[in-house]
Every structure is written in C-alpha cells, then in structure tokens.
Image (tube, rainbow, N blue to C red):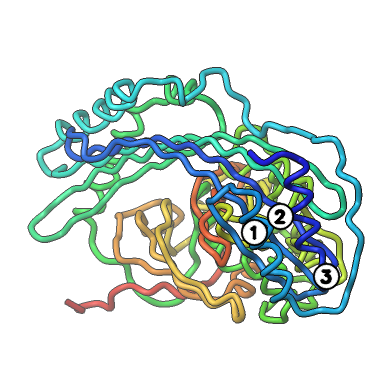
Amino acid sequence: MLSDSNIMRIIDAAMSKNADFADVFIEERKASNVGMLNGKVIKAGSSFDLGVGIRLMAGTNVVYVYSNDMDPDGLIKMALDAADALKGNSLCSVKELESMCHSSATDIKIDPMSVKKTDNVEFLRKASEYALNYDPRITQAVASYVTGKRTVRIVNSDGLNKEETAQRIRISIEAVATKCNEKQTGRVAPGTMRGYEFINEYPVIDKTRECCETALRMIDAGYAPSGKMPVVLGNGFGGVIFHEACGHALESSSVGIGSSCFTGMLGKQIASPVVSARDDARIIGEWGSYLTDDEGHESSDLLLIENGILKNYLIDKLGSRRMNMPSTGCGRKQDYSYAPVSRMSNTYIDAGKDAPKDIIADTEYGLYCSQMGGGSVDTATGEFNFAANEAYMIRNGKLAEPVRGATLIGKGAEVLMNIDRVGNDLELSAGMCGASSGNVPVTVGQPTIRVSSILVGGREDGEE
C-alpha cells in the first residue's frame, strides 16, 4: 500500500490544474474458487490483484485513470496527465488528511481463506453426487464455490481517509434434466458476507434435491399460454424485476441526466399504495451490504418508495452535483479500474400483510412464477422482458400444472401500479449486477406479490 505522504503527493498533482475535487482509490483483492462438473473438478485457483484509481472532478466534468503499478512517481505523473485532460477553471486547496477510519463489513467466525480447497471440493462433491444419483433424467450436475476478500482505502482532497475490508462467499448448484432434445435446469446460488460457517451450516443435500425436483418438473411441463393475465411472483429472486425495471431507473446515473422514466417524480405516486421499497446496504451479513461506499461515504438504509410515493433516489457524488442533492452512499464499482457510479445494494419490496396462500386463493386464473431468470430492460422507458425459470398455472385459486417458456413483458412503472397484493414472506436472494462501473454484488428481494395484469409471452394453442 502507498504511504500517506505519497498519496497526498498524488492528490496535490491531481489538484494542480482545474480540479475542484480529487480522490485516490487503493484496492487489494484476494480470491479463491473451485468449479465442478459431474463430480470432477474442472477449475480451481486463487488470484491476487492490487491497483490504484485516481479521479478528478471539475463541476460535472470527470477524468478517471488507473494503474496496477504502485510506483509513486508513476502515479504522480498519471495524475498530472489527468489534470491536463480535465476541463474546468477551478482552483481549490487540498485539506489536511484526517486520521484513518477503518471498518469491516463482514462478521466472520471462520476465515474462508484459511480453509483448504479439498474441503471445498468435498462440499461440492456432495451436491454433484447426490444430483447424479437422484434420477436417471438428471444428466448434469454443476457446482461452484468462490470467496473473495477486498480491502480498499479511499483518500480525497477534502481530507477523507477511510479503509474498509469486506469478504464474501457464494456457491452455485445446478441440476440439469434431459428429455429427448429438451433440457431444463434447477439452480440455487446463495451468497453471503459471513465466514465459512455459512458453508458448514448450509443444507446442501436439501437444496440439491430442490434443484433436481425443479428441473424434473419443468422437463415434463407443457408450454405457458400467452396474453394478459394476473401474475403472482414468488418471493426472493422474483425481486429481480423490481431491481431491473425500477431500481436502475432510480439511480442518479440515469435520473441525473434525464434519461429515467422517474426523473422529476420525487414526492409523486409511482406505485400502488400497497408497495413500499428500500435499498438497505447495512444489513449485517447480506451479500450486497457494505458500510462505506467506493467514494468514502457512509452507506444508508434508504426508503425508496413509501406506500406508492417516491421518496428517494440512489445518488453518488457525480449525481449529487448534477441533481443538487446529497449523496446517499451508493457510489460503487467492480474494482479500481472503474470509476464509481450510483448502484443498488440490497434492494427489495418490503413485506406486506397478506399470507401467500391467500394471494393464490384470491386469484381465479393466472400464472405463478416461483423462480425468475434473466431478462433485459430499457431504463429510459422502463420496458422489460424476463423469463420465468419455474412457473405454474393458477386455476380456481389453486396451483395447477407446471408450465415452461413463460416470459413477462411490460413497463416498470405500469407493473408498480398494478401490484395489488403483497405477501408477508419477504426473502432476499444474491445476485450480480452489471452497469458502467462493472459487476458488483447485489441482493434482490420481495415477498410474494400479485400483479393484477401483465403481458405473458408464451405459446398459442396449437403452436409448435
């Protein structure tokens, strides 16, 4: 790591021309992973990365440069070159460096980095062998384990001096069922900011069984019908629709430049009165949590929507300048090679009062999506489409036959308004989110909810 004096020399160089603000982001990252296919290890490795990012700002003009060469003189030259490239006419002084404040976002009992890879292999082998012996139609079992430890230090021209360490674990178990030329997959992929005790406590056999049963149900399922209908979305990863179709449109990276469908909507109703939603980066042990963002700001438990009313946006430093609003501590990035932008953390629709069984019973006909898959969204319009990995028809208020091939199509703003029932079974699920600042760990979530009407893309009667 760089000394305080060298860091301040870099900041002085960055501030020597037109910048009114500069920060230095120093990152050290260690990672370990194991991957298995059908009981055989196909990859196992460890990695180490160290680098520095330097950001200069003049109003809303930004220059960002980075290097994995830790030579102070080279970094000072890089800062001077960046200063020459920055447009502006400000000249601001550099404040005295504060005492360093260190935080740890992880509650660890057993350090994952101290665990032998052979222990990880045995854990994954349990899942693989169980899946392959579960049913002859399960033809493939894929399992993986990854852990990473990240330490960042952020120093800026305002004197801020912070360091944070975070450590994460994520596993993935997939069971693939085959019937003729058809394949269907059941998958779980939990992530956490706990230590290896999470692995020791994880019910790997039960979860693998769930994957197998999902794949087998879907391989025998008929195709979903198409058309507008009520849709009940299961808890947990069902929240990916809110994340993609609504959450991204609340980030200042789009709101601040007027490219969001929610620009100028603060204080207005954007959702049904039964909907409240949060972005809470401070949940202990949750996959998407952190205490300090990648700009050095404290994270927050942010109320986004309250009873349908838009209360807050997700705002980073650049968005703060563009929107003349304070940062909400959500400036995040994949690593030192990216400039930070506003990003979500643990984002979810809050729990309501309805029992999930009552929501189903109150739905005469529709679709129940218990597991969502991938999709796409246009944040400017809110238009989205998402595949349902596991779905069932609802008939006469009861879950009926499984169906496959269902796609949900709509606009985020319309979906929010059409949510008419919200369950009491809030659950969070780990994921990765990609944007202009790279891939970052996030959590999505929701209780069981019902959308009164949404377009389902499926298969027309008689269609081959």
Quadrant of the rendered structure where residue 406 is?
Answer: bottom left
Tag in front: 3 or 2: 3
- Mark 2: few/some/many CA within 10 Å (<14, 14-19, 20+): many
Nearer the observer, 459 or 334: 334
The amino acid beneath tag 2 is: Cys
The amino acid beneath tag 1 is: Arg
Percent across and percent down for residue 163 are 71, 38
Q: Kindly identify the residue that appears in the image at 53 percent across and 51 percent down.
A: 68
The amino acid beneath tag 3 is: Arg
Circles 1 and 3, Cβ within 8 Å, touching? The answer is no
Q: Which residue is mark 3?
A: 321
Percent across and percent down for residue 217 are 25, 48
Quadrant of the rendered structure where residue 117 is?
Answer: top left
Percent across and percent down for residue 312 are 79, 62
Q: Kindly identify the residue that appears in the image at 59 percent across and 59 percent down.
A: 66
Q: Quadrant of the N terminus?
A: top right
Q: Quadrant of the C terminus?
A: bottom left
Circles 3 and 2, Cβ within 8 Å, touching? The answer is no
Q: Which residue is mark 1?
A: 343
Q: Which residue is mark 2?
A: 330
Nearer the observer, 383 or 62: 62
Q: Kindly identify the residue that appears in the image at 82 percent across and 73 percent down.
A: 18
Give SS at disc 1.
loop
Give SS at disc 2.
loop
- In three-dimensional space, the C-alpha distance between marks 2 and 1, rounded to whole angstroms, equals 6 Å
Q: Kindly identify the residue that appears in the image at 52 percent across and 48 percent down.
A: 235
Circle nearer the N terminus (2, 1) = 2
Specify whether residue 301 is in view.
Answer: no
Give SS at disc 3.
helix
Specify whether residue 97 is in view.
Answer: yes
